Amino acid sequence: MDAISYERAPDAAAAIRSASQPGVVFIGGGTNLLDLMKGGVARPVKLVDITHIDGLDRVTPLPDGGLRIGALARNSDAANHAWVRERYPLLSQAFLAGASAQLRNMATVGGNLMQRTRCHYFYDTGFPQCNKRTPGSGCAALEGNNRIHAILGASAQCIATNPSDMSVALAALEAVVRVSGPRGERAIPIAEFHRLPGERPDLDTTLQPGELITAVDLPPPRFAQHAKYLKLRDRASYAFALVSVAAALDMDGDTVKTARIALGGVAHKPWRASETEQMLAGKPLSRATLQSAAALAVREAKPYRDNAFKVELAQRAIVRAVEQAAAQGGVA
Ligand code: SF4
């Protein structure tokens, strides 16, 4: 067993200073990290406990009418916060679709952003081929069991998917991730936070070494009345999405003024269906228009041996989620 040192950071500045060395990892809820460590996938030399940093678990209103959710807010607390439920029901639904109640009680918003793929080969060190775990080793999923893998945006290096439900809703809401690091603070639009695999599938995000996620900012609410997070999976709870859809609509009667649609379970990052959104904007919502728009979302899909079903499933999920968002919406 490897030796690991532990440090409890009193504040963000101390945490960032401690993380300047290679092999140092922040730990919040630890729900994914401890699994990775037990399996020998992650081998940190030092854990910096950030759970005692004051103020990072708060949910606070922003001057522009938006909402700031601290990185240490527990998923269950964020899901059930009155402001999140009332103003961002899409996000509340996505939180509650993730994991189990026990895990949601432990997992933090920042950790949710950082959780790693559930590719079987990534977690099983008995398979030497995994470019994400060991760069340059190959990808066992390309010719292996790839039922849960990506159909969009993958590369010859990696076809893994991002497992987060929360991040799919954040993509549709165009949230901003706030980070603090050795070079100061910066704000990263959620669309730029997670990466496609390209030639570096070992990098999941655009975070720089030593940067600490401090909060997620939500823009002023526009989609509280018409929002639906639809998650399709192999069993009803504690399972990751085969396909998920975050649908948020701004409606004028039956006409869609603005549509925001993001997909989960199909790519290495939450996948915005921009062409689908553009086709729906300004039109009365009809099944025929919606089916044509949904087809655009998977126009460039590249399925593998076991996951061609996701191409059809994604289109059907978009149709159902948008229709349900239009019809009901409201508080989660
Ligand atoms: Fe590893 Fe990615 Fe291939 Fe899975 S899909 S085996 S995570 S390189």
Image: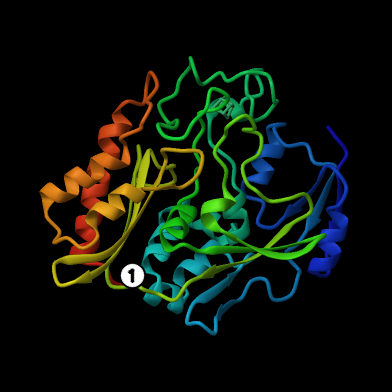
Q: Nearer the viewer, residue 250 or 21?
A: 250
Q: Quadrant of the C terminus?
A: bottom left
Q: How many callouts does the rendering have? A: 1
**121, above or below 175, in the image:** above
Residue at point 53% right, 22% down? 156
Residue at numbered disc 1: 223
**223, above or below 136, in the image:** below
Residue at point 64% right, 25% down? 131
**316, above or below 216, in the image:** above
Q: Ligand 1 is in which quadrant of the figure?
A: top right
- Which amino acid, by three-letter code, is at mark 1? Phe
Badge 1 density bin: few <14, some 14–19, many ≥20, Cα 10 Å: many
Res 183 visible: yes
Say left or right for 248 vs 193: left
Indicate the position of residue 269 as horizontal and vertical percent values: 50, 44
Residue at point 81% right, 70% down? 11
Q: Quadrant of the N terminus?
A: top right
Q: Nearer the viewer, residue 168 or 231?
A: 168
Q: Residue furthest top?
A: 143
Q: Quadrant of residue 229?
A: bottom left
Res 108 visible: no
Q: Secondary structure at mark 1?
A: loop
Mark 1 within 8 Å of ligand 1, using the beta carbon: no
Residue at point 53% right, 62% down? 75
Q: Quadrant of residue 241?
A: top left
Indicate the position of residue 311 as horizontal and vertical percent values: 30, 33
Q: Nearer the viewer, residue 78 or 264?
A: 264
Indicate the position of residue 164 as horizontal and vertical percent values: 50, 49
In the rendered view, how is the structure colored? rainbow
Indicate the position of residue 123 as horizontal and vertical percent values: 61, 30
Q: Residue furthest bottom?
A: 63
Say left or right for 175 vs 152: right
